[in-house]
Image (cartoon, grey):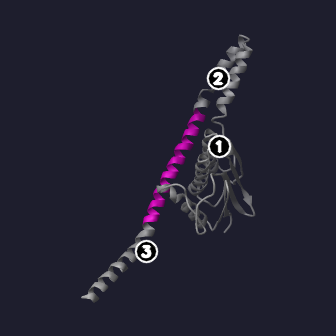
Amino acid sequence: MELAIIIGIASVLVINALLWFFWMPLYVDRKIGRFQNELVDRHYAEVETMYRKMRGWRHDYHNHIQVLKAHMEFERYEEAKQYLTMLNDDLTTVDTVVKTGNVMVDAILNSKLTMIKEREIPVDATAVVPEDVPFSGIDLSVLIGNLLDNAMEACAQIANKDERFIRIYIDIIKKQLYISVTNSMDGRARRKGSQYLSTKTGLHGFGLIRIDRIASKYGGFINRQNEEGVFATEVMLPLVS
């Protein structure tokens, strides 16, 4: 009887172990896939909003010219000057902030830069990316988008707005696409062993995993550094295999 109980318990443990071994990776992959789809959908909506604003401004361009001509014809120079100032302020909200050389990177990077500026976070961005790179456009969007989302959320937790900042640097270094994002944060990042833990819950926690998988997919390398009040991530993706 006792032998039967022991065998039963052992069988249950073996079955649970097998379920964990085979089912857990599928569960994680499904969650990551859902996270990626939601992230891409959000990025698409952000980019579409930005370009819709640009198209709207261009559509109104003719009307703006007519207003300016009317001011000039009636010698209302001060009104014309004020109108030009207003147009300049309006244009800065839709103009492309950074031109990297890669359309996909331009779209996601400028979308995120617009969001960062709307949150009044000081940002410094320098980016150069070839049009022809051996990486999926979606992968680049997920990678860059998630890095900047994380940076924005970390800055948002800092009570003193004067202490917030984000620095972005993307360039080609030694035949690698080098992506660096440095941001201020409140305190230090949490770690479990050598792994940094996300401060977010739910699907958002899969962002770090997704970044790691994209880097691994292309034989790249990730370096994360943290000190009091500052977090930095470097991603290096080889341009040649």
Residue 4 falls in image quadrant: bottom left
Q: Is residue 75 magenta?
A: no
Q: Amino acid at mark 1?
A: Asn
Query: In percent of the image, x 35 and y 77: which residue is there?
Result: 15
**Of the residues tagged 2 and 1, which is closer to the observer?**
1
Q: How far apart are labels 2 and 3 at the CA level?
A: 64 Å
Residue neighbourhood size for the residue with mark 3, other residues' Cα within 10 Å, grouped as few (<14), some (14–19), many (≥20): few
Farthest residue, direction top? 74
Question: Closest to the observer: 170 or 158?
Answer: 158
The reply to whether dot 3 and dot 1 touch (C-beta < 8 Å) is: no
- Disc on res. 98: none
Q: Position of residue 131 (x, y in %)?
A: 67, 53
Looking at this view, is 76 or 188 the one in front? 188
Please name the residue that numbered disc 2 is placed on: 64
- Mark number for residue 160? 1
- Please report the bounds of the magenta region as a residue range: 27-55
* Residue 209 placement (x, y as % from top left): 54, 62
Three-letter code, disc 3: Phe
Mark 3 and mark 1: span between their CA atoms?
46 Å
Which residue has dot 3 on it? 21
Q: Main secondary structure of the magenta part?
A: helix
Residue located at (69% from left, 29% from top): 88
Looking at the image, which residue is at 70% across and 62% down?
176
* Percent position of residue 120, x then y: 64, 39
Q: Determine whether the residue tagged by mark 2 lies in a helix, strand or loop.
A: helix
Work out whether residue 53 can be spotted.
Answer: yes
Nearer the observer, disc 3 or disc 1? 1
8 relative position to 159: left or right: left
Mark earlier in primary sequence (2, 3): 3
